[in-house]
Image: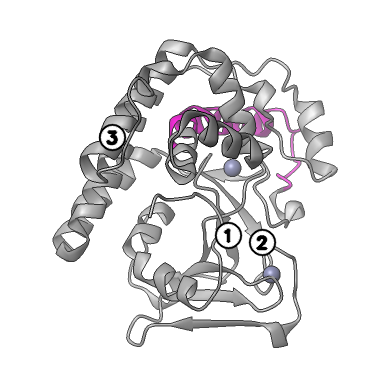
């Protein structure tokens, strides 16, 4: 139904090391994201997702009705694994971003909190807003913690689900990845972080940084409001780097960065492409446009 990046963490961590050498000015931010990815990679290693309640027929019917496959209720993740990663990420935020984490906050999260965090990350962000004001932590920090703690487990679900759905297809029937064509992730329902134009035929794939699914989308069109009127869609890039552009929509005032593989010798893992082009986010936000995907503590 959609493709999942194989060995996402191994690839991203290796490319971040190369990127640090090529762009030393990004060292500090890359150390932060590299540490985050290492902690996540470790957390997901031995995790076995439980797909009960996600039968192929149910998934196919959800998919054809435009509903993402996973909801917060589907996620069965053991408390010790979640808490370990949660605490590791709290420490990483304190070391690399000098974020203030209230006393006792790291250890205070129990199973019911994680269920709420999953609901907040997947279904209703007002849950996270309420939790932030109750616990006294900044909203963007709590969002980052919730998303990054859940992400490696959710990406295991996405990977196993994609394999199960592929296996369950009748012989000779192709996958239906070309039918989705929506602006949100077919697996978890979140907005894309970045998009990519393939080198050969220039087809456009959107990337979900939460579950690491990539899915096909129309070449021209805004993923956030589905606007496809050409006079309100445009893009810009920094001179000399035509391989990375920012697609903006004047209708909804959102933007998405696009990696144009046709203009490049070699493109990276989409998440690393995002990290290597953070300067473009600053420009787009200054122009009054808002990005999709993961919230990053500023
Ligand atoms: Zn997703
Ligand atoms: Zn739009």
Q: Is residue 123 above or below residue 238?
A: above
Identify the disc placed on residue 205: 1
Alpha carbon of mark 3 to alpha carbon of mark 2: how far?
Answer: 30 Å
Q: What is the quadrant of the C terminus in the image?
A: bottom left
Q: Is residue 253 above or below residue 28?
A: below
Residue that numbered label 3 is attached to: 38
Alpha carbon of mark 3 to alpha carbon of mark 1: how far?
Answer: 26 Å
Q: Position of residue 97 (x, y in %)?
A: 27, 46
Which of the two discs, 3 and 2, sits closer to the camera? Answer: 3
In-image side of 66 versus 97 (left or right): right
Q: Is residue 8 above or below residue 252?
A: above
Crowd band around label 1 with a 10 angstrom C-alpha radius: few (<14), some (14–19), many (20+): many
Q: Is residue 142 above or below residue 215?
A: above
In-image side of 247 versus 30 (left or right): right
Q: Secondary structure at mark 2?
A: strand
Q: Earlier in the sequence, mark 3 or mark 1?
A: 3
Ligand 1 is located in which of the four quadrants?
top right
Q: Earlier in the sequence, mark 3 or mark 2?
A: 3
Instruction: State the residue at coordinates (39%, 23%).
Output: 105
- Main secondary structure type of the part rendered in magenta: helix
Q: Earlier in the sequence, mark 1 or mark 2?
A: 1
Q: Secondary structure at mark 3?
A: helix
Which of the two discs, 3 and 1, sits closer to the camera? Answer: 3
Q: Secondary structure at mark 1?
A: strand
Instruction: State the residue at coordinates (76%, 41%).
Output: 173
Alpha carbon of mark 1 to alpha carbon of mark 2: how far?
Answer: 6 Å
- Can residue 102 be seen from the camera position used here? yes
Q: How is the image coloured?
A: one colour
């Amino acid at each position: 139904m959609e493709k999942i990046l194989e060995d996402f963490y191994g690839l991203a961590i290796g490319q971040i090391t190369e990127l640090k050498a090529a762009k030393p000015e990004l060292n500090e931010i890359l150390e932060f994201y590299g540490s985050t990815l290492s902690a996540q990679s470790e957390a997901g290693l031995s995790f076995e997702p439980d797909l009960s309640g996600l039968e192929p027929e149910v998934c196919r019917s959800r998919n054809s009705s435009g509903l993402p496959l996973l909801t917060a209720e589907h996620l069965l993740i053991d408390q010790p694994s979640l808490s370990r990663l949660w605490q590791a990420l709290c420490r990483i935020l304190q070391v690399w971003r000098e974020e203030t984490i209230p006393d006792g906050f790291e250890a205070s999260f129990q199973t019911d909190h994680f269920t709420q965090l999953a609901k907040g990350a997947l279904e209703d962000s007002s849950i996270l807003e309420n939790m932030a004001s109750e616990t006294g932590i900044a909203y963007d920090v709590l969002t980052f913690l919730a998303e990054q703690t859940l992400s490696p487990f959710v990406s295991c679900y996405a990977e196993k689900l994609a394999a199960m759905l592929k296996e369950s297809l009748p012989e000779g029937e192709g996958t239906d990845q070309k039918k989705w064509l929506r602006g949100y992730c077919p697996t978890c329902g979140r907005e894309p972080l970045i998009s990519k134009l393939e080198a050969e035929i220039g087809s456009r794939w959107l990337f979900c940084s939460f579950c690491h699914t990539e899915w096909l989308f129309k070449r021209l069109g805004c993923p956030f409001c589905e606007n496809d009127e050409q006079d309100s869609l445009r893009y810009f890039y920094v001179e000399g780097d035509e391989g990375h552009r920012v697609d903006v929509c004047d209708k909804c005032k959102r933007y998405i960065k696009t990696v144009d593989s046709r203009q490049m010798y070699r493109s990276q893992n989409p998440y690393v492409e995002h990290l290597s082009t953070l300067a473009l986010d600053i420009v787009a936000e200054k122009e009054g446009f808002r990005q999709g995907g993961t919230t990053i503590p500023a």
